[in-house]
Amino acid sequence: MHESETSKDWKWQIANRISTREELEGYIELTADERAAFNGSIPLSFAVTPHYANLLKHAALRRTVIPTGHENALGTGELADPLGEEDHRATPHLIHTYPDKVLFIATTFCSTYCRYCTRSRLVGKPAASTFEQSFQYIEEHTEIRDVLISGGDPLTMADPVLDELLSRLREIPHIRTIRIGSKVPAVLPMRITGDLCSILRKHRVWLSLHFIHSAELSPETQAACRKLSDHGIGMVSQTVLLKGINDDTQTLIDLFYGLLEINVKPYYLLQCDPVRGSAHFRTSVEKGIKLIRSLHGRISGLAVPQYVIDAPGGGGKVPLIGKEQIHREGDDILFLNHQGNEYRYPDPMDYPI
Ligand SMILES: *Cc1c(COP(=O)(O)O)cnc(C)c1O
């Protein structure tokens, strides 16, 4: 296939991203619906690394990155900004929703765009450049302990830029934990170089990695995670629950055990946010609860993440354990967040359970 020495290099992978229908057709035969989606206007940026394109023979992965006509439909309760992040935007790069942690959107660039991206309103689009105002905000807000650097994908930034960002955050005395959210080990594993590992280790960074299916755990991805682990970097995973892709017990077990084997602790199983054009990816909340219940007690507790729903409008992440936590009102479910405030999530009854 598309193999050469240079394809092992992450900069080559980014420079040679597949971003048009014609390029994608060099890897995979498209369905009529997929081809039609490309001919229309695609609401969300499209790009896939050559590495990930070579995995698209797996039907599950294919659906998460190739546009379809479903994206043009606006589902019940769907919004451009489902988590109300813009209401909590403290500076051009900071979202401050929780008291002691802050989300630092360091870049809007991703090597590969997920079709269900909760930040589809921002990704692939230009962003403000200087971080200075954001550093000042964190310095002034001495209650902040934890900075979660996300995007876009921060690990697509060049080593010196990342090193400088992390150094600057480490100079702030009240910051105790720095995390980076990334899908790079799955979509661009060759980015995990010795130099990058040294930078992450130097600044004692935790990685929060996005994985959705065991088909992503290619030999290159496994090697990348083992390398990070060998450098002493702590890793957890976040998995979005996706209809027809990973919403069955065995698929989740295969993924979570596969992650543990490469020293990644399953952290969150996230109910899919109601971002516009994502209804075809969403399972019902009741099914999510059933699935997580099917894992508790059955497999290693280490392999079981927390099932969480991110309360629309900025209520934060709420762990769901039992059906008694949710209350149905028509097509919505209601539940309480950590402050005891009630939040509403669109969960139409016509989803097959
Ligand atoms: C998810 C999220 C965080 C981190 O939350 P944890 O539950 O600590 O992993 C921080 N800020 C925002 C805005 C988030 O959405």
Image (cartoon, rainbow, N blue to C red):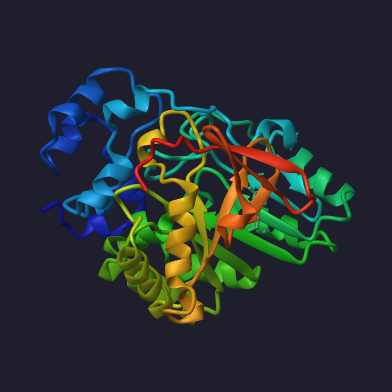
Q: Nearer the viewer, residue 337 or 3?
A: 337
Residue at image location 35% in from the left, 36% down from the top: 280
In which quadrant of the rendered view does residue 162 lie? bottom right
Give the percent coordinates (x, y) of residue 324.
61, 56
Horizontally, is 241 left or right of 2 in the view?
A: right
Q: Nearer the viewer, residue 15 or 134?
A: 134
In this rendering, the answer to whether 264 lies above or below 246 is below
In this rendering, the answer to whether 282 lies above or below 256 is above
Answer yes or no: is residue 32 visible: yes
In this rendering, the answer to whether 201 lies above or below 322 is below
Give the percent coordinates (x, y) of residue 248.
33, 60
Horizontally, is 333 left or right of 37 in the view?
A: right
Residue at image location 51% in from the left, 53% down from the top: 270
Horizontally, is 313 left or right of 3 in the view?
A: right
In which quadrant of the rendered view does residue 227 lie? bottom left
Residue at image location 29% in from the left, 67% down from the top: 220
